[in-house]
């Protein structure tokens, strides 16, 4: 059966997606081949290799978030952080859903899968928003930019969540057999967001940057994402049969998506420069002036007067403030009333 718009039948027969147990029929759609399960502490764990990728993805995302937060003055820092936080949440929920820790027969699985679908849509919305941050339609990091991002992601999350739960529960004209809305937000929407992001960043590099090296990051990220989707939706069953059910296309799909997300970070890092003057750290540097060169009374002498005073006697008004043994000239020579040179017998 070929790919059909709005239908999960052929897709779920090949790839073991999270939504597959809840669409197609009242019993869901079972893939023709999927990764073998393992028994851990009396609990049957599905997709163990994919769960390992979820854990690695969470760790790597945490590292990337740390380095992004350390670039205090980089352009679009707060906006790109939203993307990585959402991606980490997707991986966290995916770990519980793919592994079967949350049983597919429970009502909780439907609600958490709906949240998962909404988060995926919001994550790609965040990526799409970041595609235009570099064009400075609004100054990055300002309330206007951040709230536009937050509201956009919240709206897209709400739409994705509603379409998913309406499909699973069978209301608002949707059901497990009529999942066109969920199909659009779960499969088509990410494709549109990625395509717009790639095109916009290529325009940004060619029009505004002096170097062309970031294009390599874009191409590598695109290649990883496309390869992952092809392996997941076209060759998952073939891989599963060839490797004796140890892994399937879902493993390679999640791995390639992780690599493409890492290339998003690499690309962002390569096109952003921070002002080192303002990025030395969070703590303000305290400069303690122990010996001000100007007189305490706020008097300001001209350069000629200061120079002339340097050759005058110790009690003169223009005594130069030269540093001698931790004292300025006024203090040092003022203590010795006879001036310089010292009197005989000193």
Image (tube, helix red, strand yellow):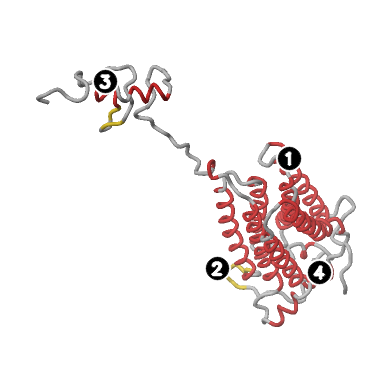
Residue 269's quadrant in the figure?
A: bottom right
Q: Residues within 10 Å of mark 2 (few under 14, many from 20)?
A: few
Q: Secondary structure at mark 1?
A: loop
Q: How far from the left and from the top, in percent, is residue 65?
A: 59, 52
Q: Secondary structure at mark 3?
A: loop
Residue at (84%, 57%) from the top-left corner? Answer: 184
Q: Which residue is mark 1?
A: 138
Q: Which residue is mark 3?
A: 313
How far, Cα to Cα, is label 2 from label 3?
Answer: 91 Å
Q: Residues within 10 Å of mark 4 (few under 14, many from 20)?
A: many
Image position of 276 (left or right of 317): right
Give 284 or 54, whichever is nearer the viewer: 284
Q: Secondary structure at mark 2?
A: loop
Q: Mark 2 or mark 4: which is in front? A: 4
Give the mark nearer the N terminus: 2 vs 3.
Answer: 2
Q: Which residue is mark 4?
A: 11
């Amino acid at each position: 059966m070929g790919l059909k718009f709005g239908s999960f039948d052929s897709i779920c027969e090949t790839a073991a997606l999270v939504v597959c147990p809840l669409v197609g029929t009242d019993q869901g759609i079972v893939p023709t081949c999927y990764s073998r399960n393992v028994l851990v502490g009396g609990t049957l764990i599905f997709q163990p290799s994919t769960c390992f990728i979820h854990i690695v993805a969470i760790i790597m995302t945490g590292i990337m978030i740390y380095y992004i937060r350390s670039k205090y003055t980089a352009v679009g820092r707060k906006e790109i952080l939203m993307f990585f936080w959402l991606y980490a949440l997707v991986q966290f929920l995916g770990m519980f859903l793919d592994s079967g820790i949350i049983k597919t027969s429970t009502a909780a699985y439907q609600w958490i899968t709906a949240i998962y679908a909404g988060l995926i849509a919001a994550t790609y919305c965040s990526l799409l928003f970041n595609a235009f941050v570099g064009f400075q339609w609004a100054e990055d990091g300002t309330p206007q930019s951040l709230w536009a991002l937050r509201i956009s992601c919240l709206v897209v999350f709400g739409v994705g969540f509603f379409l998913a739960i309406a499909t699973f529960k069978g209301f608002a004209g949707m059901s497990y057999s009529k999942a066109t809305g969920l199909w659009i937000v779960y499969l088509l929407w990410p494709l549109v967001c990625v395509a717009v992001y790639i095109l916009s960043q290529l325009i940004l590099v060619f029009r505004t940057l002096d170097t062309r090296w970031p294009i390599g990051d874009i191409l590598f990220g695109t290649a990883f994402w496309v390869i992952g989707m092809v392996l997941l939706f076209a060759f998952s069953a073939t891989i599963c049969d060839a490797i004796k059910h140890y892994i399937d296309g879902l493993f390679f799909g999640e791995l390639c998506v992780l690599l493409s997300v890492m290339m998003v970070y690499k690309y962002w890092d390569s096109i952003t420069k921070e002002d080192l003057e303002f990025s030395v750290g969070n703590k303000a540097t305290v400069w303690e002036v122990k010996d001000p060169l100007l007189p305490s009374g706020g008097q300001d002498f001209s350069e000629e007067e200061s120079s002339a005073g340097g050759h005058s006697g110790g009690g003169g008004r223009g005594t130069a403030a030269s540093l001698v043994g931790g004292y300025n000239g006024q203090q040092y020579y003022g203590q010795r009333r006879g001036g310089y040179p010292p009197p005989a017998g000193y």
